Image (tube, rainbow, N blue to C red):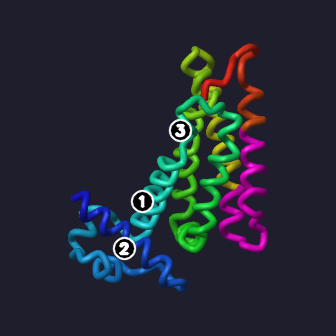
Amino acid sequence: MVRTRDALTAAIGDLLVDSEDRLPSITDVCSAAGVSRPTFYQHFADVSSLVQAAAVERLRVLFDRVVPDPAGEQWEAAMPRVVSELLDSLFADADFYGRVLRSSNAHAFQERVVEFLAARLLAFSPLGDAVRAGADARRLQRSATFLAAGATWLVVGWLLEADRRPSVPEGAEEIADLLVTSITAQRPTGAASTK
């Protein structure tokens, strides 16, 4: 089951980059993945849901690869490097993400990205430290979601409009500055950054 799902997500990734005018059909995907149509339906309801799943998986792999240095790198110092590495990969895959963002399921994909980013902010930033120290978890979750939505909005615009796209260092500086400023402003007085 896992191999089949992986074959389908790999196939849609290749097909999205190769076909610019339309989403590939289920027949196209099945042929590229080497699976039958009933096998496709065991995993996905339609091509749009496969596109969304493939894009979220690609993001998960990317974020897992680009994490703050566990050897004690301060969160504020790590943020520009982490965001730069993320943007570098996202911009390199701009054709793929652009197709995903122009698909019929783009809104659902963006919602999943915001949820994913909010969870990452709570796991790897002082927001999570504050929650673990007993701060108002609901308020901090809303803050993480708000920041994730803003970062997503910026990056989506850059991915969809190449002429507005900054260089990786410029974009990373803008996003890192917004995240660090917003998150550190919520840190209780006297609290030290641990990540």
**Left or right, residue 45 beside residue 156:** left
Q: Residues within 10 Å of mark 3 (few under 14, many from 20)?
A: some
Q: Residues within 10 Å of mark 2 (few under 14, many from 20)?
A: many
Q: Residues within 10 Å of mark 1 (few under 14, many from 20)?
A: some
Residue 118: percent from left, percent from top: 58, 40
Alpha carbon of mark 1 to alpha carbon of mark 2: how far?
Answer: 12 Å
Compared to residue 188, the image places residue 147 above or below, namely below
Q: 188 or 49, which is in the foreground?
A: 188
Q: Which mark is residue 53?
A: 1
Element on which disc 2 rests = helix
Residue 33: percent from left, percent from top: 29, 75
Q: Which residue is mark 2?
A: 11
Q: Earlier in the sequence, mark 1 or mark 2?
A: 2
- Single out the mark in the foreground, 1 or 2: 2
Amino acid under label 3? Ala
The magenta segment is 154-179
**Residue contact at pointers 1 and 3, CB within 8 angstroms:** no
Element on which disc 1 rests = helix
**Residue contact at pointers 3 and 2, CB within 8 angstroms:** no
Amino acid under label 2? Ala
Q: Earlier in the sequence, mark 1 or mark 3?
A: 1
**Residue contact at pointers 1 and 2, CB within 8 angstroms:** no
Compared to residue 20, the image places residue 167 above or below, namely above
Q: Which mark is residue 119?
A: 3
Q: Residue at image x 50%, y 78%?
A: 17
